[in-house]
Amino acid sequence: MSRPTKQSPERGSARIRLLEAARDIIRAKGFAATTIDDICNAADVTKGAFFHHFPSKDALGVAVAEFWAETTTGFFEAAPYHDPADSLERVLAYVAFRKAIITGDIAEFTCLAGTMAQEIYASSPDIRDACGRSIFGHAATLEEDIETARRERGITGGWTAESLARHTQTIIQGGFVLAKAGDNPELARESLDHLDRYIRQLFHVTEDGAK
């Protein structure tokens, strides 16, 4: 997942400001390179305030992954890809929307949960699991439309709505990695174009919508 990003540090409670600061800095620097001092400075709070809300940096990591899931859920629920009447069109509109929001600096469109999961999957199981809940929970929101599209079009095969929903996230997260490695957002957009083509092939639909 991606998008919700920078807000003024003057807005919200100290805890929210800490979470927003952690979200933005970790996306730019990674979890290990982000210090408590970095987060406190960006949030304009004291270190004492940090430890009032979070007993450790790892506790913050879990909390910021959960905060990410909460804030991105609202963002995606309000997105226009839900509008088409046809279920497959909603799935394809989701892919198009994910491509459309790849804008700005790389740290602004990449996924906090994906960034942290890649870095700490072995060293911090609690953060890893929180990131997993975010990514898999978002993937699950696509399953109903995919299954409905399968049923309506009589599509069969050795795959499920759940597996295709997870695959969308594989492509999106992989695109983010390539964008970082190549310092080029277009590499992530390219991945979404291929995902669109793949889904159309699965459902035997051409780019102009014909079967």
Image (spheres, rainbow, N blue to C red):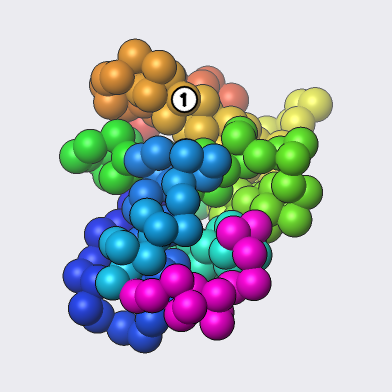
Lateral position of residue 99 relative to residue 141, left or right = left
Residue 17 is covered by the magenta coloring: no
Residue 111, picture quadrant = top left
Would you say 205 lies left or right of 131 here?
Answer: left
Q: Is residue 75 visible?
A: no
Residue holding disc 1: 177
The magenta-colored residue range is 45-58
* Rendered position, 112 above or below 50: above
- Using the image as rendered, state which of residue 56 and residue 74 is in the foreground: 56
Q: Report x, y in % for residue 135.
A: 60, 49
Name the residue type under label 1.
Val
Asked if residue 89 is positioned above or below residue 177 in the image, the reply reads: below
Magenta-highlighted stretch: main secondary structure?
helix
In the rendered image, the residue lying farthest to the top is 182
Give above or below for 169 relative to 68.
Answer: above
Q: Nearer the viewer, residue 45 or 89?
A: 45
Residue at horizontal 75 percent and vertical 31 percent from the top: 159
Instruction: Residue 137: give x, y in percent of width and height.
Output: 64, 57
Disc 1 packing (10 Å; few <14; some 14–19; many ≥20): many
| Residue at screen point 30% across, 57% down | 5
Residue 46 on the magenta span: yes
x, y percent for residue 2 = 40, 48
Q: Residue at position x 75%, y 56% from top?
A: 126
Residue at 43 percent of width and 30 percent of height: 176
The image position of residue 120, as x and y in percent, is: 66, 39
Residue that protrudes farthest toward the bottom in the picture: 13
| Residue 108 in view (yes/no) | yes
Query: Judging from the image, what secondary structure is the residue with disc 1 in?
Result: helix
Instruction: Depth check: give the residue in front, 17 or 164.
Output: 17
Foreground of the two, 6 or 190: 6
